[in-house]
Amino acid sequence: MDYDDYVQAGKIASVARSEGYKMIEENVKLLDVAEYVEDYIRKSGAQIAFPVNLSINNEAAHFTPPPGSDLVFHQGDLVKLDLGAEINGFIADTAVTKEVSTNNWTNLIKASEEALNNAIKKVKVGAMTSEIGREIEATIKRYGYNPVYNLTGHTLEKYLLHAGTSFPNYDDGSRVKLYPGMAFAIEPFATTGRGRVRGLEFGNIMLSLKNESMEYLKDIHKFSRGLPFSMRDLARHFSNYEEIARESEKKKYLYFYPVLKENKGEMVSQTEHTIYLREDGPVVTTL
Ligand code: MN
Ligand code: MN
């Protein structure tokens, strides 16, 4: 049943998140953390719902290390670890922020954490997404920071990571009401900047567009199940993955996610949980 799968995926994602969090230290390779966390999810009986994101400093989201990457974490890095587990199409999506070896951004991290906790307190049947957003913005502003206005939480559906409804990080005036059986991720982003991010360079994460004109596109759709995948996944399935990626980009066979960045170099923190709303209240599956 979907509820049980959401709960089980949430438990796996939660352990994966704390294991990954512990591994983020100075001089450790991003690749080692990403692969460890993805392997952990797979061996726990789930699939990865999307590649492990390790976005640093002004990067808000959508960076994952490419195959063979020797990038390492440095002192002072503000790292967003964002990961997903999926069972029978039901997804847990969760994120945490860690600062490597320094304590310059403790309050920025706390701002997104407390915004998420306060937002969850507002979750009940009949509440509006804009009330939750208002709580997020107010909490982050109390810390003297801004929410990222153009990133949102989202509903989750079977094999669909970003389903129809958005959960804004401010009061956007929407009248969308929460209903029993709704599954969604809330993900406040706090920033020292003005509160906007932009898609800049390619981040090694892509999505099958269900174009099956090429034999390899059929294989890609099969292994990715319509969910985002990474260049590392492509490399696992095809020895000529670089050629496939180049052609797919040129011919727009796949969607390539850009890395979302605060373009003035301002810092960004993120905290995220997945919630299943029952008649009697929210169940935070990724606690
Ligand atoms: Mn996420
Ligand atoms: Mn999310």
Image: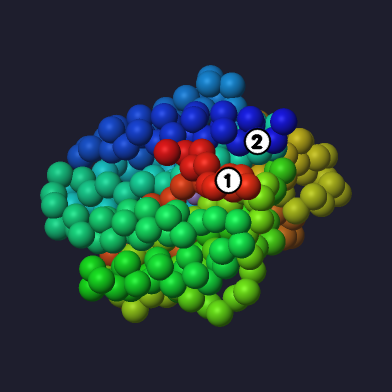
In the rendered image, residue 206, in percent from the top left (x then y), is placed at 61, 51
Q: Nearer the viewer, mark 2 or mark 1?
A: 1
User: Image quadrant of residue 112?
Assistant: bottom left
- Whether residue 245 appears in this view of the structure is no
Q: Tell me the residue at 66%/56% (across/down).
A: 179
136 to the left or right of 92:
left
Amino acid, disc 1: Asp
**How many discs appear?**
2
In the rendered image, residue 285, in percent from the top left (x then y), is placed at 51, 38
Q: Tell me the residue at 65%/35% (across/down).
A: 3
Circle 2 crowding by C-alpha within 10 Å: few under 14, some 14–19, many from 20: some
Do labels 2 and 1 touch, CB within 8 Å?
no
- Whether residue 282 appears in this view of the structure is yes
- The extreme front residue here reads 280
**Element class at badge 2:** helix
The residue identified by callout 2 is 3
In the rendered image, residue 169, in percent from the top left (x then y), is placed at 45, 68
Q: Tell me the residue at 23%/49% (across/down).
A: 99
Q: Earlier in the sequence, mark 2 or mark 1?
A: 2
- The extreme right residue here reads 213
User: Image quadrant of residue 266?
Assistant: bottom left
Question: Nearest the camera: 159 or 133?
Answer: 133
**Element class at badge 1:** loop
Q: CA distance from mark 2 to mark 1?
A: 14 Å
Amino acid, disc 2: Tyr
Circle 1 crowding by C-alpha within 10 Å: few under 14, some 14–19, many from 20: few
In the figure, 285 relative to 194: above or below?
above
Question: Nearest the camera: 215 or 102?
Answer: 102
Residue 280 tag number:
1
